[in-house]
Amino acid sequence: MTFAQAGAAEIAAGIDDMYAAFLAGDRQRFDTHLDPDVTTWETHLPGPLRTRAELDEYRARRDAAGQRPRLAVLAARDKRIDVWDDFGVARYELVARLGPDDEPEITRVTDVVRRIDGRWVIVHHHAELVRQPVGAA
């Protein structure tokens, strides 16, 4: 296995673990996949969040309002990952379902990752909603 292939496998496993942590409600584990200076640009978020501290402020407001999503499924599919030295880019579709039989919400995601102290962390996360579930407002 080449260095790039090994790095891509590590990045893919990290992405899968991050979303498993979200489903488990384990923010601490989720956040181990994020650089402290991560930029987060998502369709449903209020403007670009330029650090994890800004992301945490958003989360605190969301959670205080009782709006934390409860999902049955949250999974990355069709991953394409490229690695160059200590940097990589992961592109994939994120599938979210409220219930196992509900229509999926599909989001296109691009994560820019960097290897720091032997671990791959996300330094930029960009997600664009491309299909809402049927009946969604």
Image: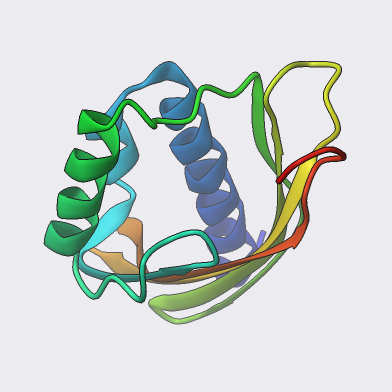
Report the residue at 86% width, 17% height from top.
101
Q: How is the image coloured?
A: rainbow
Which residue sits furthest bottom? 84
Q: Give the quadrant of the N terminus.
A: bottom right
The residue that appears at 20% across and 43% down in the rendered structure is: 61
> Image quarter for residue 51?
bottom left
51 or 70, nearer to the observer: 70
- Residue visible at 51% across and 36% down? 19
Q: Viewed as shown, does residue 32 lie left or right of 132?
A: left
| Number of numbered callouts drawn | 0
Residue 103 can be seen, yes or no: yes
Q: Along the horizontal axis of the image, is 63 left or right of 45?
A: left
Residue 66 vertical position relative to residue 128 in the rendered view, above or below: above
Q: Is residue 133 above or below residue 47?
A: above
Q: In x, y percent, where is residue 57? A: 15, 52
Percent of width and height locating residue 129: 68, 61
- Please tell me which residue lies in front, 76 or 113: 76
Residue furthest front as drawn = 137
Q: Is residue 79 above or below residue 40?
A: above
Q: Nearer the viewer, residue 44 or 7?
A: 44
| In the displayed structure image, the side of residue 99 where residue 101 appears, left or right | right
Q: Is residue 117 visible?
A: no
Q: Residue at x 65, y 63 (%)?
A: 5
Query: In the image shown, does 137 or 72 lie closer to the viewer?
Result: 137
Give how far across and how far down residue 34 sits, in percent. Answer: 29, 55
| The image quarter in which residue 67 lies | top left
Q: Position of residue 20 (x, y in %)?
A: 51, 27
